[in-house]
Amino acid sequence: MHIRYKDVGNRIRALRSERNWSQSKLAEKLGIAPTHMSNIENGKTKLGLEIAVNLSEIFQVSIEWLIGKSNPKVVEKYGEELANLISDSTPSEKELLINIVNDTKKAIRNYERDGDNT
């Protein structure tokens, strides 16, 4: 399998730009140096598995899409699934579900940031 690292870098740059993030901000999220991030985006450095997985999680895209071997985005799949789940909900149920999802997301992110302190 041949990976076109320049194309991978272009996809990463596009995703980063959609969020109005600098290379430095994305590098910080990945725990890498900004120069390393620049080299990845420019196709000068091969993308390691750990960074690919982290990018996949940050941007909610599949690794296959990221490396150019598949087109569907994970977000689109889950967005459709979530829409189907709430399609028959009342307005008050939808509001409650949104609050539950927001609270759960915050708890997950806090857990991931702080780790298991038990």
Image (cartoon, helix red, strand yellow):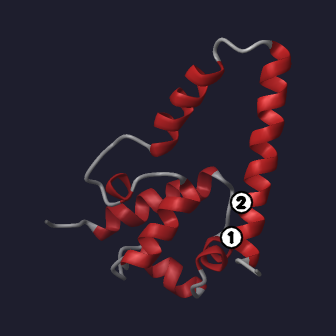
Is 77 placed left or right of 1 in the picture?
A: right
> Tags 1 and 2 in contact by the CB under 8 Å rule?
yes
Q: Secondary structure at mark 2?
A: helix
Callout 2 amino acid = Ile
In this rendering, the answer to whether 2 lies above or below 30 is above
Q: Residue at x 43, y 43 (%)?
A: 73
Q: Position of residue 46 (x, y in %)?
A: 33, 80
Q: Position of residue 100 (x, y in %)?
A: 79, 39
Callout 1 amino acid = Glu
Front residue of 70 and 57: 57
Name the mark on residue 91: none
3D distance between C-alphas at marks 1 and 2: 6 Å
Q: Residue at x 71, y 77 (%)?
A: 116
Q: Residue 23 appears in which quarter of the rendering? A: bottom right
Residue carrying label 1: 112
Q: Position of residue 57 (x, y in %)?
A: 53, 60
Residue carrying label 2: 108
Front residue of 28 and 106: 106
